Image (tube, grey):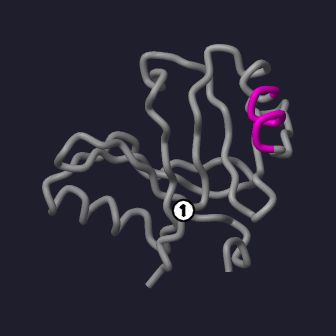
């Protein structure tokens, strides 16, 4: 059974560059733009991190997306449905990185699951 650690948090930003600078100055986060995904990542120094995604209808301002570690995303997503939740994004590969799936719990909260291609990730 996975520890179910929080492994990634996405923060919507109207201006990703400005948000990166804001959080770098406010919290001292390390910021790294990943050009091949057009995605900007942040790390807090403890190993926890996430990214800034552009505000859009799918990523509205005010809705942070929290990713939890999963040993079996497919099984977890089946359990989401069995328990009254809804799968919004089936298991999807992030090239050379890992896999994720997104779901909505019965209350309407949107959360995500993540499995790394690196077996030592988050140990």
Nearer to the camera, 34 or 51 = 51
Q: In this view, does 75 lie to the left or right of 9?
A: left
- Report the predominant secondary structure element of the magenta stretch: helix
Residue 52 drawn above or below residue 73: above
Q: Where is residue 47 in the image (x, y as percent from the top left)?
A: 75, 64
Q: Where is residue 2 in the image (x, y as percent from the top left)?
A: 48, 79
Q: Where is residue 49 in the image (x, y as percent from the top left)?
A: 70, 52
Q: Is residue 78 left or right of residue 28?
A: left
Is 14 covered by the magenta stretch? no
**Quadrant for the C terminus in the image:** bottom right
Q: Is residue 97 left or right of residue 29?
A: left
Dividing the picture into quadrants, the one containing residue 79 is bottom left
Q: In this view, does 78 lie to the left or right of 72?
A: left
For mark 1, give the secondary structure.
Answer: strand
Give the residues in magenta: 21-27
Residue 72 drawn above or below residue 36: below
Residue 84 drawn above or below residue 2: above
Instruction: Assess disc 1: are there few (<14), some (14-19) or many (≥20) residues with their C-alpha within 10 Å of its C-alpha.
Output: some
Dividing the picture into quadrants, the one containing residue 80 is bottom left
Nearer to the camera, 22 or 107 = 22
Nearer to the camera, 39 or 94 = 39
Q: Position of residue 69 (x, y in %)?
A: 52, 67
Is 25 covered by the magenta stretch? yes
**Quadrant for the N terminus in the image:** bottom left
Residue matched to label 1: 6
Residue 35 drawn above or below residue 117: above
Question: In percent of the image, x 48 and y 42: which residue is there?
Answer: 65
Nearer to the camera, 6 or 91 = 6
């Amino acid at each position: 059974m996975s520890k179910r650690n929080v492994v990634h948090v996405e923060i919507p930003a109207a201006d990703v560059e400005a948000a990166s600078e804001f959080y770098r100055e406010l919290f001292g986060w390390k910021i790294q733009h990943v050009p091949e995904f057009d995605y900007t990542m942040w790390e807090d120094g403890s190993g926890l991190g996430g990214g800034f995604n552009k505000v859009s209808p799918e990523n509205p301002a005010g809705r942070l997306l929290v990713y939890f570690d999963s040993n079996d995303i497919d099984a977890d997503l089946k359990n989401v449905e069995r328990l009254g939740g809804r799968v919004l994004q089936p298991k999807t590969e992030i090239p050379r990185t890992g896999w994720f799936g997104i779901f909505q719990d019965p209350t309407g909260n949107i959360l995500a699951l993540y499995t790394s291609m690196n077996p030592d990730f988050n140990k």
